[in-house]
Structure formats: C-alpha cells, structure tokens
Amino acid sequence: MSLTLAPRAVPARLTTLWKVVAGTPANAVLSAVLAALILWSLWRTLAWGVLGSEIRPDPDACRAAAGACWGAVVERGRVILLGRFPASEFWRPLFAMTILAGAVCTAALPRFFNRIGLAFTVAGLLAFMALMHGGPLGLPVVTSDLWGGLPLTLFLACVACFFGVPAGILLALARRSRLLTLSWLATGYIELIRAIPLITLLFFGAVVMPLLQPPQAQWDTMARIAFCLVAFEAAYFAEVLRGGLQAIPRGQYEAAHALGLSPLQTIRDIVLPQALRITIPPTVSNVIGVIKNTSLVAVVNIYDLTGSLKVALADPTWKHFTFELYLLVCMIYLVVGAAIGRYGRFLETRYAMHGR
C-alpha cells in the first residue's frame, strides 16, 4: 500500500497577500514598479547615508564627501540635545532627563495607575527642576533661560499633560453640569482657547502676563509658558473627554442611582473610567500633539529641541549641512511619537470594552 502526503495548506494570509500583490496582471505590474522604486530609494539612502558619508567633524572633509555629513551631528548634536546649558554641567540635564523619563514610564505601567504612579511623576518633576536649577543641592545655579534641548521638551510636555489632563476633566464635567453658570463659564473658556492659536497664547504668556502681574510677584518666563501650555492642553482634552462622556449610556447613571451611589461616586467610579477607556485613541493623539506643540515655544525664545536647533544652525561653519541636523531632530520626534503611539495601542488592547 502506497502512502501519499497531503499538500501543505497555504496560510490564508499568504493567499490574501498574493492576491493583492499579483492577483491580476495590473496588480503584478504595479507591485513590480513599487518594489523597484523602494529598492532604488533604499540604495540611494544607503549610498548617501553610509557609503558616501563623512563622520569626522571636519567641514572640509564634509564638503569633499559624496554623501551625508554626520560630522555636523557629532559637532553640533550636543547643542541640539542640551541647548545652552553650561558645558561643564551637561551631566545635570542628562541625569534630570533620565530621572523624569524613568518616573513617567514607571507611572505609565498599569499597576501604578494609582497614587503611587502620581507620586512617581511628582518626584520626577521635582527632581528635574532641582537638578536643572541647582542652588540648594550645592550645584551652581542655572537660570531657566539657559535650559533647553530635549530635556526641556520632555519637561514642558510632562507639565502640560500632568496639570492639563486633570484640568480638562474638571472642564468637561463643568461643561456638562446642570448649573448653567458653571456650564457657560466652562464652555466659554474652552471655545475661547480653541479659537486662539497656540503661538498667540505663548506671546500672551511671554509679553502680556508680566504687564498684568505686580512687580513683586513676577512669574519666571518658563513658568508663564508652562501655564499657557497647560491652559491650552486642558481645553483640548476637555473636548476629547466630553465625547467619551456623551458615549456613556443613560442607563449607567440610572443603575448607579439605583445602587444608592452619590453623584460624585457615580462620576468617579462608574462614568469616568468608561469615558477614559473610550477616549484612549484621541487622548494618545492629543499627547503626541502636546509634544509637537512644545516646538512652538521657540518663537518666544525658549530653547526647546527646536529652539536649540536654531542655536546650532547659527554656527556659519556648518551652515551647508543643515539637512543632517534637521534629520536628527525629526528622528527624535519620530521615536518619541512612535513610542507613545505604541503605548496607546497597548492600552487599547488591555482596556478594550468588549460587547459595545
């Protein structure tokens, strides 16, 4: 008796992929053209970025190179990443950024979605400011106008989210309140902030707010700019959360009332957890937008990552190699944004509301 082996089944995904790529003559031709363009682009990128590049921080060698001048990144990258902070104290922004990033990443773990995570974030922010400013720790004092680069970008984004999200929750609840005065005030604030460009709000913080404050109680420029970012973030997050609150069925409120829960308990234990789950995707997009919006503080002479790039480009020695420096900044924003987006997808999967 002869034995015959059954043919191995082709996975359904491969079959579907093959139909899309080469299911018809037109698809096959288009796929071949796209593959050729991709291969050509990869080869050109490899030739420019690796084979013909120059890594030595020598302008003359870079001009003679056929490809990229990574020497400009080597020479000016420290200024881009750390801004105008005194060179002898560069370890402080590096250490402060590491502590802040570690605290925020720890607080972002689901097991720390409680007071412990809140304590981690507060400790990270306080440690960042203490290290950057110095003074009581026996470190040389560095005023906030010298802070800059990637540490400042992360700090401003963390402050905007840390204070803006709770403020946005209060605004969203106030806008849906039955108290007409409270609702009108919240609505007016949200619509006003959303109608004003962020740059205008930053100019208000940098130029107008000092005129409105008494001379003996003037805020630091960094504090005023952070306040404007918080105010802007609060208004936008309030609208994001309001959409989640409107998606909660009325039966949830009625069931909570039937169980004897107070209005505060209903909002805190029943409504808000569901609304926050529903709004995970737009909230993640909003956080990424906050990080990108911090680049606008450069217009009021706050040297975040983008502002530090302007400082680095001021050196005429490297004025012909700006593309590589811009590419460095773009890659930093890309990595940070992609990491936050991946974290958002993790939260969506973990807290998915099945059956809706």
Image (spheres, helix red, strand yellow):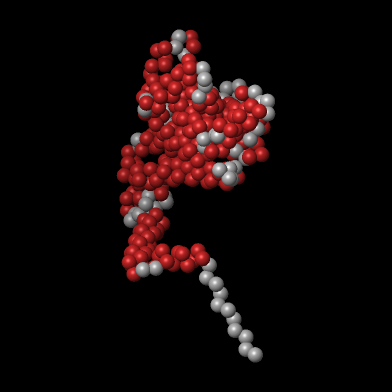
Residue 342 pos. (x, y %): 53, 46
Quadrant housing residue 315? top left
Using residue 13 as the reference point, say whether residue 198 is left or right of it: left
The residue lying toward the viewer, choosing from 285 and 64, is 285
Q: Is any atom of residue 4 visible in this view? A: yes
Residue 272 pos. (x, y %): 58, 31
Using residue 327 as the reference point, say whether residue 137 is left or right of it: right
The residue lying toward the viewer, choosing from 101 and 59, is 101
The residue shown at (37%, 52%) is 68
- Quadrant of the image containing the C terminus: top right
Asked if residue 308 is positioned above or below residue 40 in the image, the reply reads: above
Quadrant housing residue 76? top left
Q: Is any atom of residue 87 visible in this view? A: no
The residue shown at (32%, 53%) is 64
The residue shown at (32%, 38%) is 316
The residue lying toward the viewer, choosing from 30 and 87, is 30
Q: How many marks?
A: 0
Asked if residue 64 is positioned above or below residue 165 in the image, the reply reads: below
The residue shown at (40%, 27%) is 194
- Quadrant of the image containing the N terminus: bottom right
Residue 293 pos. (x, y %): 42, 33
Asked if residue 187 is positioned above or below residue 118 in the image, the reply reads: above
Residue 79 pos. (x, y %): 44, 37
